Image: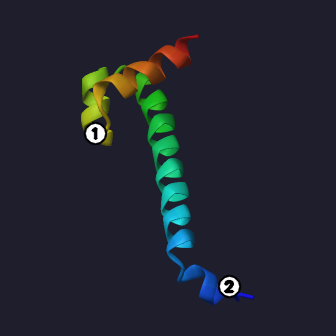
Amino acid sequence: MLGLGELKKTKFYQEAFEEAFEEGKQEGKLEAASKLLQQCLSIEQIAEALSLDVETVRQAAKQKSS
């Protein structure tokens, strides 16, 4: 059986960890986008500041207004 240290060295673990990290990072950016929209920044400004595409910010804005 693999110990935790050995498990962390596997490609499967590393890919799963990286994917989870990226998903969390994206969720954080979308939450920040929502707060920046409340501060009356434009969708384009938010997209640029958070390194997101404009369509992603538009979708977040639509979800927030619903």
- Single out the mark in the foreground, 2 or 1: 2
In the rendered image, the quadrant that contains the C terminus is: top right
Q: Residues within 10 Å of mark 1 (few under 14, many from 20)?
A: few
Q: Nearer the viewer, residue 13 or 22?
A: 13
> Which residue sits at x=34%, y=23%?
55
| Sequence-wise first label, 2 or 1 | 2
Query: Which residue is label 1 attached to?
Result: 49
Is 1 above or below relative to 38?
below
Quadrant housing residue 57: top left
> Which residue sits at x=31%, y=22%?
43
Direction right: furthest residue: 1
Disc 1 marks a residue whose amino acid type is: Ala
The percent position of residue 53, horizontal first and vertical second, equals 29, 31
The percent position of residue 4, horizontal first and vertical second, equals 68, 85
Query: Which residue is label 2 attached to?
Result: 4
The percent position of residue 28, horizontal first and vertical second, equals 50, 44
Q: Which mark is residue 1?
A: none
| In the image: residue 4, left or right of residue 17 | right
The percent position of residue 41, horizontal first and vertical second, equals 32, 23
* Kind of element beneath mark 2: helix
Q: Nearer the viewer, residue 38 or 55?
A: 55
Colour treatment of the image = rainbow
> Which residue sits at x=70%, y=89%?
3
* Kind of element beneath mark 1: helix
Direction top: furthest residue: 66
Disc 2 marks a residue whose amino acid type is: Leu
How many discs mark residues in the rendered view?
A: 2
> Which residue sits at x=44%, y=41%?
29
In the rendered image, the quadrant that contains the N terminus is: bottom right
Q: CA distance from mark 2 to mark 1?
A: 38 Å
Is 53 above or below relative to 38?
below
